Image: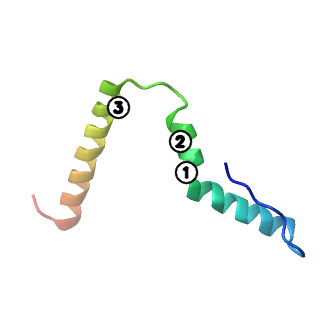
Amino acid sequence: MANVTLKPNESQESLLRRFRKKVTNSGVLSTVRRKRWHISKSELRRIEKKKAIRRARRRQRKTGVR
């Protein structure tokens, strides 16, 4: 849980900016998004395999090797 306290002479905008940075660095939002729906292990493996294939194709296109 990200916790931020107001420093003396600190504006609300800078406090909010520090809070957002802490939340993104802690990875809370990515965890929430990932756990929003239950995904079985087999489905997760299939998704990861698709991502790996997509990454490999993208790398091949970048280097120009076929």
Q: Name the residue at the right extreme.
A: 9
Give the residue at mark 1. 27
Residue at 38%, 23% (x, y): give it.
40
Residue at 18%, 67% (x, y): give it.
63
Count residues near mark 2 (Cα–Cα under 10 Å), then give few for <14, some for 14-19, many for 20+. Answer: few
The disc label shown at residue 31, or none: 2
Position of 5 relative to 2 (above/below) = below
Circle 2 sits in a helix, a strand or a loop, which is it?
Answer: helix
Give the residue at mark 3. 44
Q: Amino acid at mark 1?
A: Gly
Whether the residues at callouts 2 and 1 have beta carbons within 8 Å, the answer is: yes
Whether the residues at callouts 3 and 1 have beta carbons within 8 Å, the answer is: no
Task: Locate the C terminus by quadrant.
Answer: bottom left
3 or 1: tag closer to the N-terminus:
1
From the viewer's side, name the closer residue of 35 and 60: 35
Q: Amino acid at mark 3?
A: Leu
Q: Name the residue at the left extreme.
A: 66
Separation of marks 3 and 1 at Cα, in angstroms: 19 Å
